[in-house]
Image (cartoon, rainbow, N blue to C red):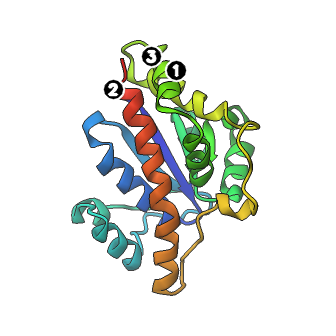
Amino acid sequence: MFEILTVCTGNICRSPLAETLLRTRLAPYHPLVHSAGTMGLESAPMTPEAVRLALGLGIAQDLAANHRSRYLTDAELRSPDLILAMSREHRRRIVEIAPGRLRSAFTVREFARLAADTSDEQIAAASATGGVDGRARARAAVAAVAAQRGMSAPPADPGDDDVIDPYRRSWETYQLSASQLVPAVDQVVRVMSIAMTAR
């Protein structure tokens, strides 16, 4: 089993949408996926708009409806094999709380950008060093993606590594946020699927 943590501000829009997408799309590998917020509300549900997006993306209604927000703590950051922030600001906060997690913390779009420059063969070779242990394989795959830092060209606009915050904004902004998030999640699923199945 491997573990992924997704992080945003209030833990009611972006990070729970990422969490539920990853839980659903990585279900064959039985990962532990959870989310938290840097300014998390206490036990708040996803916004109705985020639930609408989740359902439209094939997330089970009970999975979206049962989400309750939680606050990001040091304890939350100790065990994940991959930490996916929704913005550079969230990643900075993660590293402030847990400096030792620098190499395993990315914005989700940064991870996707670096993963796109990491071949299937590179991911497979790296994950194979983890043997049969799912967590070791996941960590090795994440390290292979992290190795692209400094090698891959940075985005022309640093903001392209962020997922826009749609909270209290229009439905069109929610759709824009999802259009940024979903392709990034697809790359996470690609990397983890290769890590879990490559021999």
Q: Quadrant of residue 104?
A: top right
Q: Nearer the viewer, residue 113 or 62?
A: 113
Which quarter of the image is occupied by the N terminus?
top left
Which quarter of the image is occupied by the C terminus?
top left
Give the residue pinned by disc 1.
Answer: 126
Q: Nearer the viewer, residue 188 or 14?
A: 188
* Lower sequence index among marks 3 and 2: 3
Residue at 31% over, 64% down: 64
* Lower sequence index among marks 2 and 1: 1
Does residue 24 appear left or right of residue 70 in this picture?
left
Q: CA distance from mark 1 to mark 3?
A: 5 Å
135 w.r.t. 183: above or below: above
Going by the picture, which residue comes out furthest to the bottom? 170
Type of amino acid under label 2: Thr
Residue at 57% over, 35% down: 118
Q: CA distance from mark 2 to mark 1?
A: 12 Å
Circles 1 and 3: CB atoms closer than 8 Å:
yes
Give the residue pinned by disc 2.
Answer: 197
Does residue 119 appear left or right of residue 25 in this picture?
right
Does residue 69 appear left or right of residue 162 in this picture?
left
SS state under label 2 = helix
Judge the density around disc 3: few (<14), some (14-19), many (≥20) Cα neighbours within 10 Å: many
Type of amino acid under label 3: Ala
Type of amino acid under label 1: Ala
Q: Nearer the viewer, residue 65 or 1?
A: 1
Residue 183 location in percent, x, y? 47, 57
Residue at 36% over, 72% down: 53
Q: CA distance from mark 3 to mark 2?
A: 9 Å
186 w.r.t. 102: above or below: below
Give the residue pinned by disc 3.
Answer: 128
Residue 191 location in percent, x, y? 45, 37
